[in-house]
Image: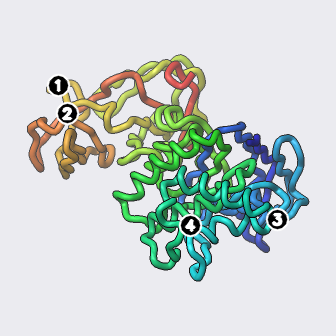
């Protein structure tokens, strides 16, 4: 398989900049996810790696070789599209065999490789079926099989589960991850669905407006986001941002919120602005009987083992996650404070997270 590196990769369509000087290293055998909202540049980045789009500038390296000048067919990379891109008039066997026949493999080799891929994906019983007669999940397996059958250096997948219903998409996430592990693949996977990304990825690159904002493991992306955008985009619900009307200084370990004082991780640096934000996940807040921030319960979402409370405060609406047996009701006045030291200060001048004891 392969290491993939992009250096200062840039793509413009006229005056519109789709990808802004991106730099990433995707390690050999890694499952790497490009995650972000529609129009953030993730699919354009994937298509440039595949050779389906030419970069405006920058380099694409496959196993240290610059392949930016090579055609897609010369890069030894397989691409799985969202809408399958299968031949509906062919049966499953012929769809799987097609890329091997184009590469002039012998009939014996074609038959062996097709059967190997079909058994791995559990579609060997469908080899004689027309793809037009298959359900969406089986069509997706055929599309994966056609990419897998020639064992390329890397697999690129552009929202391959986007057309599937939620229950089957969750199952296919697990199967795709298992497939990745079984074949020791290098996989680059594009999605806008954070649940897919968090469940599948070794590392995630969060993109917005053509820029890579952070590339880290799912755990670090969730717990230590580097920007407000990443903090809000990851998590359901996203991180709370509580406004702080004071300048944060190095070594500061508490902040004033209305009539309450909250502990924060000791800060390694200060802010440039007098208006900043305390970032805290809903599960890192707790209800208290006194000395907390006051608010009224505006909404209660029951989610099985937990509830999400929406609390109206003078600082804005705050989300708090509590156990499902917590007795609360709409319009009830409550108080809350922080549960632990997992808070992040975001500089109001640039939306960047400050370095602190927690972030180090």
Viewer-nearest residue: 340 or 290: 340
The disc, 2 or 4, on the residue closer to the chain's N-terminal end is 4
State the mark number for residue 104.
3
Task: In the rendered view, tell whether residue 329 sits above or below residue 105.
Answer: above
Viewer-nearest residue: 233 or 274: 233
Task: In the rendered view, tell whether residue 339 sits above or below residue 159.
Answer: above
Q: Of circles 2 and 4, which is in front?
A: 4
Label 4 and label 1: CA atoms lie apart by 53 Å
The disc, 3 or 4, on the residue closer to the chain's N-terminal end is 4
Q: Residue 272 appears in which quarter of the rendering?
A: top right
Residue to which mark 1 is pinned: 290
Label 3 and label 2: CA atoms lie apart by 71 Å
Kindly identify the residue that appears in the image at 71 percent across and 41 percent down: 26
Which percent across, then down, holds residue 240? 38, 42
Which percent across, then down, holds residue 295? 21, 41
Kindly identify the residue that appears in the image at 70 percent across and 58 percent down: 78
Residue to which mark 2 is pinned: 335
What SS does tag 1 mark?
Answer: loop
Q: Residues within 10 Å of mark 3 (few under 14, many from 20)?
A: few
The disc, 4 or 1, on the residue closer to the chain's N-terminal end is 4
Task: In the rendered view, tell whether residue 233 sits above or below residue 55.
Answer: above
Which percent across, then down, holds residue 104? 82, 65
Label 1 and label 2: CA atoms lie apart by 7 Å
61 relative to 293 in the view: left or right: right
Q: Residue 264 appears in which quarter of the rendering?
A: top left
């Amino acid at each position: 398989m392969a290491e993939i590196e992009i250096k200062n990769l840039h793509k413009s369509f006229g005056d519109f900049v789709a990808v802004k000087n991106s730099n990433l290293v995707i390690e050999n055998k890694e499952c790497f996810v490009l995650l972000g909202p529609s129009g953030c540049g993730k699919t354009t980045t994937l298509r440039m790696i595949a050779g389906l789009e030419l970069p405006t500038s920058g380099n694409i390296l496959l196993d240290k070789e610059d392949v930016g000048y090579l055609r897609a067919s010369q890069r030894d990379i397989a691409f799985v599209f969202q809408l399958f891109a299968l031949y509906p008039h062919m049966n499953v066997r012929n769809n799987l065999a097609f890329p091997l026949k184009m590469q002039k493999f012998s009939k014996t080799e074609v038959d062996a490789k097709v059967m190997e891929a079909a058994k791995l994906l559990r579609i060997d019983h469908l080899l004689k079926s027309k793809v037009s007669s298959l359900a969406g999940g089986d069509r997706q397996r055929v599309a994966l099989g056609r990419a897998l059958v020639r064992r390329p250096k890397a697999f690129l997948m552009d929202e391959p589960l986007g057309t599937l219903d939620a229950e089957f998409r969750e199952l296919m996430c697990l199967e795709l991850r298992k497939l990745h592990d079984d074949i020791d693949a290098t996989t680059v996977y594009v999605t806008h669905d954070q649940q897919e990304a968090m469940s599948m990825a070794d590392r995630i690159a969060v993109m917005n407006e053509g820029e890579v904002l952070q590339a880290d493991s799912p755990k670090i992306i969730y717990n230590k986001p580097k920007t407000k955008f990443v903090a809000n985009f990851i998590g359901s619900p996203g991180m709370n941002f509580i406004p702080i009307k004071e300048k944060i200084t190095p070594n500061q370990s508490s902040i004033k919120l209305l009539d309450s004082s909250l502990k924060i991780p000791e800060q390694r640096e200060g802010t440039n602005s007098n208006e900043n934000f305390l970032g805290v996940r809903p599960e890192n807040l707790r209800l208290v009987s006194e000395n907390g921030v006051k608010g009224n319960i505006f909404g209660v979402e029951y989610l099985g083992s937990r509830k999400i409370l929406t609390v109206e405060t003078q600082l804005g609406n705050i989300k708090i996650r509590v156990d499902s047996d917590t007795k609360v009701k709409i319009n009830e006045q409550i108080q809350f404070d922080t549960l632990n030291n997992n808070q992040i200060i975001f500089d109001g001048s640039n939306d960047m997270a400050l370095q602190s004891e927690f972030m180090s």
